[in-house]
Image (cartoon, coloured by chain):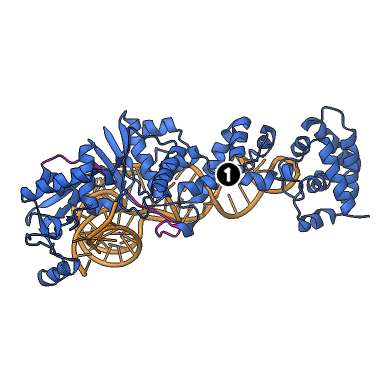
Amino acid sequence: MRVRFAPSPTGALHIGGARTALYNWLLARGNGGELVLRVEDTDRERSTPENVEQIFDALGWLGIDWDGDPVFQSRRAERHRGVLEQLLEAGRAYRSTATADDVRAWKAQHGDERGFRGEPQEEGAIRLRVPDEGETVVEDLIRGTTTFRHAHLDDPVIARADGSVLYNFAVAVDDLDAGITHVVRGEDHLSNTPKQLLVYEALGEAPPRYAHLPLLHGPDGRKLSKRHGAASVQELRDAGYLPEAVRNYLALLGWGHGDDTKLSTEELQRLFRVEDVARNPARFDEAKLRWLNGLYLRELSPDELARRLTEHTQRQVPAQAAQITQEKIQTLADFWPLAGFLFDGPADDPAARERVLGRDGARDALAQARAELAGAPEPFDVAAVEHALRHVVEARGAKPKDVFQPVRLAIAGTTVSPGIFESVATLGREETLRRIDALLEASGA
RNA sequence: GCCCCCAUGGUGUAACGGUUAGCACGGGAGCCUUUCACGCUCCAAGCGGGAGUUCGACUCUCCCUGGGGGUACCA
């Protein structure tokens, strides 16, 4: 089995493209087959080497690997010319100067549902000769049988007048030469498939098996795009999602296995079957991705989480800092707003200060907490901090939050933070006392 | 316009001729609780419409409606 994935090399690996890549990869790897990349790099404006490289990076981040060197369409011009010549000689294709306007005029005369048929000329673009009778049937692994009557099909242009080839022709020839057995792509290609099938037919070659995936939409049901937020895997990565979570979520967009929602890569490879892919379009729902990402995040060891946070924040994140936030964040990006105070000092949130210090006895509680913490025995760990702070609560006959919130405000500057004992212990005694003093002083009295 | 695909709660899906239509996200209520979360319990919410076929349709057929794609000398 040889499966191929053809990303559109525009720099950003679109989420829909990523899912297609994933399904190709699962199909290939799950069956001990090979995955080859075919790069449609004929649009030099967008398909720059840098953009192609970005696509490869994004695939690598997702953990999708491929076999051998990618096939670049632009590098196969000579082979394409040869096949063109062959079709021309066999009478399966012909040159024609007919333009889109000519095609329209032809339809005006023969009816809209009537496919365009041209007369062979000495020059012009090359069109594939579509038989007048009969039909081409697409046997799709996901959709079953779709029939296209030849009478409805225009003779497709397969090469421009300048000799450069067009997609529907090139893709068929390239896949043929690469020995591709399975083509899994977006449903937007379903209508193109008969044209490609006709190329194989004209060549007397057997086509690969096809599987057309339902398209992905944004939350509003429209085509997924920038205005829906993250639309590419690069953006997902920047937003702090884990590749394993993205992979799992993407797999679930159009496919599933029973009641399972969390599936490891191994399970995905073992259970995935293209035949089971849904036929209806799916919407990309970031809320579910966030939830799933949180699940994966909480599974990481503190050291591993710290490593990923360090990479994402570009700051050295200690394992302890990572650990105390682990069950409170859903993405890597959630870490800094929650724990940045450990690194850069308390946040400046006047409203929070007002709310917490405005309560009766808040400053006294804070002062008392300071004294207890100053006198707490070594080691200054979570247990010691808890003991000290709980003692303050008891001594004052107060509610826990009457003591904890002022301390939280002092060290974090906000009313939201990781556990107070953990946070204080992580900050250390010296820094904690310094921050409490600073707040006490700043709040006057 | 023409060709083609699709249609289960807000979202992703399961059920493949006979189930009280299942699971998950999200939403609501509650428990837990030092904030925020996590976790746990419970609740609301669905077969687009109409004809058939059948003893029996979410499941099969047709029509309609709605959504999507294609219709390039783009990929």
Q: Which residue is mark 1?
A: A331
**Total numbered labels placed on residues in the image:** 1
* Residue A247, quarter of picture: top left
Q: Provide residue A11's location: percent of width, then percent of height.
A: 42, 49
What residue is at 7 percent from the left and 59 percent from the top?
A122
What residue is at 66 percent from the left and 32 percent from the top?
A319
Is residue A203 visible in this depiction of the protein? Answer: yes
Of residues B13 and A99, the one nearer the viewer is A99
Magenta highlight range? A204-225
Question: Is residue A214 covered in magenta?
Answer: yes
Q: Provide residue A194's location: percent of width, then percent of height.
A: 18, 51
Residue type, numbered disc 1: Thr
Of residues B47 and A399, the one nearer the viewer is A399
Residue A428 versus residue A105 in the image, above or below: above
Is residue A361 visible in this depiction of the protein? Answer: no
Residue A173 in the figure: left or right of residue A378: left
Quadrant of the image containing the N terminus of chain A: top left
Colour for chain B in the figure: orange
Colour for chain A in the figure: blue
Residue placed farthest to the right in the image?
A445
Pinpoint the chain carrying mark 1: A
Question: Is residue A74 covered in magenta?
Answer: no
What residue is at 36 percent from the left and 34 percent from the top?
A66
Of residues A233 and A414, the one nearer the viewer is A233
